[in-house]
Amino acid sequence: MICSGCAPIQPIEDQGTVRLKPLNLQLTAAIQEKGLSMEVFTEFVAISYNSKEEMLYLLQLIHNLPIEATDQLTISITGIEKDIKLSPWLTLSQIEATLEHHVVVDIIRQERFTNHMQPIVDINEQIVGFEFLLRPAVEGVFFQPSNLFEVARETGLHSFLDRAARISAIETSAKWLPTGYKRFINFLPSSIYNPEYCLTHTFETIDRLNLDPKDFVFEVVETEKIDDLPHLLDIFNVYRSNGMTVALDDVGSGYSTLELMTTLEPDYVKIDRSLIDLCDKEPVKQCEIRRIIEAAAQFNGLVLAEGIERYEEFEFCRDAGIKFAQGYFFGKPAGRPPHGIHIN
């Protein structure tokens, strides 16, 4: 069983059925007034369309209705020979975004992306792991990863994309990395509704590929404020109970505050690049970095400095007590690890 948020995405076809729910008199009256044929069921109304123009006409009709007639409305569009159970219920704005950003939606739907890996080093500048970062597939359509996830949010596809990106990263790591190298993989807490169920696919992939769960570090990447801390802690607990560790990304910037870090107590604390940039020259940044290191030490969190571009930055971080580092100084994201790292 796959929940609708993670199910394979069906493209909007030129013929099919539009279902609307909940029922309301203003909506059904508007449909009847335009002479559209509809079938009324207990929980929804269904309108067949024979061309994309007819479907767009119906959506425009709904768009023009007063807000009170559409604010609770959800829409499901199913191709003529497709299973309605696999068609998600979306808001009008999500449907409109799907049509507007159809090129990006196709990239998500067809999973036309891959993962590059950026090295993570220890204090001796030895590679100990990699962060996996979403990139366009070879010969695929170019995209900015941030735009891909933004469109996924607007279209209700963020759970599908987040899961697919995780699976892609795990499979890429299996192709290139021997056991013992850490694999840092991002996840969006807002995409994981029920961690006991939603993460099953992740764990099954690791098991299927005979990988060691201890090699995996799943890191929180969230551009929105994390309001449901108990839910995020539940996600952390599920990862840990399956033998993996967790990280908090971008600490010291945006929503990844010192207070959030001390509440979550992640296994790895990744200091944001905005604090690392020129940290060897700026006392204010040095003070904040030391505060993070001291706070992380209270729960034995391992600290990693992101965005290292100069040796002097690495030198300060190392001397301050940071154990790991990542940045262009050590290597840019690439489709395969550096020479010398390979599966026996």
Image (spheres, rainbow, N blue to C red):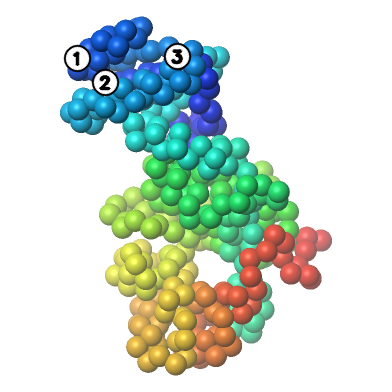
What residue is drawn where x is 58% and y is 55%?
134
Q: Residue extending furthest right? A: 344
In the image, is residue 118 above or below residue 305? above
Q: Amino acid at mark 1?
A: Leu
For mark 3, what is the residue?
49
Element under disc 2: loop
What residue is drawn where x is 40% and y is 57%?
222
Q: Nearer the viewer, mark 2 or mark 3?
A: 3
x then y, percent, for residue 176: 73, 58
Q: Amino acid at mark 3?
A: Tyr
Task: Check if mark 1's residue and mark 3's residue have beta carbons within 8 Å.
Answer: no
In the image, is residue 46 above or below residue 239? above
Quarter of the image where the C terminus is located: bottom right
| Residue 213 visible at all | no
Badge 3: how crowded within 10 Å, few (<14), some, or many (20+)? Answer: many
Quadrant of the image occupied by residue 337: bottom right
x then y, percent, for residue 129: 63, 68
For mark 1, what is the residue?
25
Task: Check if mark 1's residue and mark 2's residue have beta carbons within 8 Å.
Answer: no
Disc 1/disc 2 C-alpha distance (Å): 10 Å
Observer-nearest residue: 81 or 235? Answer: 81
Element under disc 3: strand
x then y, percent, for residue 52: 48, 21
For mark 2, what is the residue?
22
What residue is drawn where x is 20% and y is 27%?
66
